[in-house]
Image (cartoon, rainbow, N blue to C red):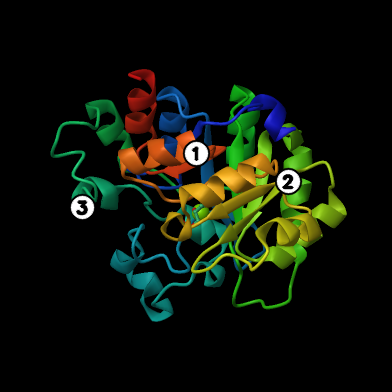
Amino acid sequence: MFFDHLPKSGYVCAHRGVRSLAPENTMLAAELALVLGADFWEMDVQRTSDGELVVFHDDDLGRTTDVSARPEFCERAPWPVHAFTLEELRSLDAGTWFAAQDPYGTIARGEVREADLGRMRGQRIPTLEETLAFIRRNDFPMNLEIKDLIHAPGDLSIVSQVLRKVREARAEDLVLISSFNHDYLAEMRRLAPEIPVAALVEERHPEDIEGYLRDLGAVGYHPDEAILDEDTVRRLAEAGIRVSPYTVNHMDRALSLLDAGCFAIITDYPQTLKSRLAGR
Ligand code: G3P
Ligand code: MG
């Protein structure tokens, strides 16, 4: 299982791939996570209008694709992912925006390789299948976040659908499933007790974190770093809970959380955190 590949703690997780050097949730960002030495990577999964599973973060396509420049889609603004077929999504350019906007300033600072810049145009929204084949091929563990499908409240079917794809790819040992929708996690536990799950939390901790996770069957806890302090990390780590806060982009803070006993740090800068750790 996932934790056999990562048996200790103190790991670095690339948030949406290496999101500071490549367009998030693309195969280029995933490949950079592997090449630059992240211990695993995180991505987001949601469903298309024709029931396929794709890797994409936002509810809408506007920010990270060229959909707004495509006249045939103008009447579907603000372009929710669930209103597009897989074929339509695959026709979008999911990479040029990054080269044009340089959202982290990494291109201006010369941190992005020419070859990677050249590959940005033409990045497509990946299918879940593509990413599973990639992790299987490379034995590269992945935190698969199932996005809360708020347009389909109470519908848990995405969980069995994800599970089917994971099993078809024989990637059960490489995935850690997380979600802000904890009903999805309970469903995953019911269907596949061999696959570990982690609870994503923002704004506030459950009153009794340990009890809550125990009841849910979650071995991982992924809180927003803004609500997490080092004492809580120490307490949870002692209880055997793998704590992986998101999204920690200040390296001193990341190191302090790792020292307190975090299982992993989910960061947009895995390359920087890896080199800080190597330099210790
Ligand atoms: O899984 C950690 C983090 O990705 C959760 O927040 O919104 O970036 O998917 P978000
Ligand atoms: Mg995510």
Q: In the rendering, which numbered label is found on residue 260?
A: 1
Q: Which residue is rendered at x = 51% and y = 65% of the image?
A: 202
Q: In the rendering, which numbered label is found on residue 165?
A: 2
Circles 1, 2 touching at the beta carbon (< 8 Å): no
Q: Position of residue 269 (x, y in %)?
A: 35, 38
Amino acid type at mark 1: Ala
Q: Residue furthest bottom?
A: 75
**Cα distance between the residues tagged 1 and 2:** 36 Å
Left/right of residue 14 with respect to residue 68 in the rendered view: right
Nearest to N terminus: mark 1 or mark 2: 2
**How many discs mark residues in the rendered view?**
3
Q: Secondary structure at mark 3?
A: helix
Q: Position of residue 120 (x, y in %)?
A: 32, 40
Left/right of residue 262 with respect to residue 164 in the rendered view: left
Q: Which residue is rendered at x = 36% and y = 64% of the image?
A: 67
| Residue in the foreground of this view, choosing between 103 and 248 | 248
Using the rendered view, name the quadrant where residue 271 is placed: top left
Would you call the spot at circle 1 few (<14 residues within 10 Å), some (14-19), or many (20 or more)?
some
**Cα distance between the residues tagged 3 and 1:** 36 Å
Can residue 108 be seen from the camera position used here?
yes
Nearest to N terminus: mark 3 or mark 1: 3
Amino acid type at mark 2: Lys
- Judging by the rendered image, the residue that carries numbered circle 3 is 101
Left/right of residue 222 with respect to residue 57 in the rendered view: right
Q: In the rendering, which numbered label is found on residue 118?
A: none
